[in-house]
Image (tube, helix red, strand yellow):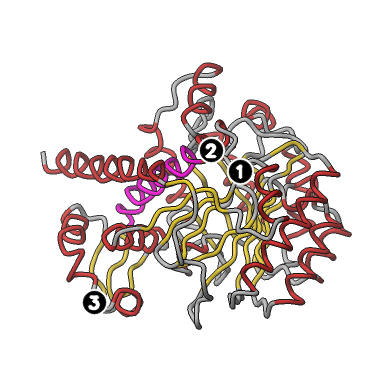
Amino acid sequence: MREALRSLGEAMLIRFVRLEGRKFLELKRGIERGFLSKGPLGKKVALYVHIPFCRQLCAYCSFNRYPLDEELAREYFKGLRKELDLYIDRGFSFRSVYLGGGTPTVMMDELSSFLEYLRLRQPIDEISLETNPRDITPENVRLLKDLGVRRLSMGVQSFDDRMLRAMGRFSHNGLEAIEKIKLAQGVFDTFNIDLLYNFPTQKPEDLKEDIRIVKELGVDQVTFYPLMPAPRKHKAIERRFSKIDHGRERVFYRMILDEMMQDGYVPSTVWCFSRGDHMIDEYIIEYPEYIAIGSGSVGLYGGVFYANYFDLTNYLQRVNSGQFPIAMSKRLTRKELLHYHLLTQFFGMSLRREVHRELFGRDPEEELGIELLVLRLLGTIEATQGGFRVTRRGMYVVSGMMREFFTGLNRLREYCMSRRI
């Protein structure tokens, strides 16, 4: 009975985040007045850069992306520089940069030029970059290393060719992914690969075989993403295959924990497992505020959550006329910011009291007492000397909550793309 009540409580927590995620659709058109009028005055602010082009579009992906058009892509990279300048000219300074997509390495000459420009204008300490196996060549690996990339993340999703075909992931096959891992492993401070789980046709033994290959290769870091498509993609996947059963996630996730935590990997986040001390891709954990540039990127600064134009024509028109290409924004309430910080910190496995106090001026128990009490009663978190940490049991709950959080973001992305915003 007690276990049933605990499972019910966990399900309610995940459902609460699902309902909260619908607030992403409450963004209003335009820019909240004044929030970008000046720079961060010494605050830690990360920079996210979105490159929306891919050679082939994957069926499960809900990010803003377009088939590669080289002429348009070159115009886009020019626009990125202009948008970057808008922030730098207002006093923004960035030391940590994450480039995602799309496929940032789809045009290496343009990417190189942009990174050189960025480092010329900013004292960058950390550069994290996404790529796919096909773009990993000896020449590109050397170039990225020389450009200052410290963390390279390669989207593998699976080593099983059958699974890759089902996912619509035609950029590589399993053997090619293995060869490219061998090429990049050990070159960068952190080399990460992404694996996808809970695809309808995937069985636990399929993922277990992927994990076996990862451990055999000695990969620095692995990030496991649950399937979390936007509503239309969700329906399309179910029409083609079968129902997406989130109830199976617990089986997959328990196996991930069992397999990864017995071989020297430790959780950097509830999705990311590292051997040793490595950088992670979730800048939202380390940076309470982040500026996002590029078409379809989303950022959070000065208590305002915002989304750039997704449509490339709209995006380029704004930046080419010297305007911020922000399409929608919303000023978050204090409670919304508190909940956001609570979720992102537990995504990173712990909530440190001193960090919370620095951000909000009060201890977490003073404004989040009920939330913390519920999480402790359910066994999701436990108290530590410096705050709270996620328990092994609680990792699955936080994983489910983050899946709903990102699904809400994907719902916003789908809304904007379908309306050519």
What residue lies at 83% left-to-right and 57% top-to-bottom? 110
What residue lies at 35% left-to-right and 32% top-to-bottom? 247
Q: Residues under labels 3 and 1: Cα distance?
A: 37 Å
**Height in image: 238 above or below 161?**
above
What residue lies at 80% left-to-right and 70% top-to-bottom? 116
Q: Secondary structure beneath disc 1?
A: loop
Q: State which tag comes first along the sequence, 3 or 1.
A: 1
Q: Depth check: 333 or 289 in front?
A: 333
**Height in image: 28 above or below 204?**
below
Which amino acid lies under the numbered mark 3 shown in the image of this protein?
A: Arg
- Residue at the disc numbered 1: 310
Q: Main secondary structure of the magenta part?
A: helix
Rendering coords of residue 243 (x, y %): 44, 21
- Magenta extent: 391-412
- Residue at the disc numbered 3: 362
Q: Is residue 54 magenta?
A: no
**Height in image: 60 above or below 329?**
above
Q: Residue furthest left?
A: 1
Q: Which mark is residue 416?
A: 2
Rendering coords of residue 331 (x, y %): 38, 58
Q: Secondary structure beneath disc 3?
A: loop
Q: Quadrant of residue 363?
A: bottom left
Number of numbered discs visible in the structure rendering: 3
Rendering coords of residue 260 (x, y %): 49, 54
Which amino acid lies under the numbered mark 2 shown in the image of this protein?
A: Cys
Locate the N terminus by quadrant.
top left
10 Å crowding of disc 2: few (<14), some (14-19), many (20+): many
Q: Residue furthest right?
A: 139
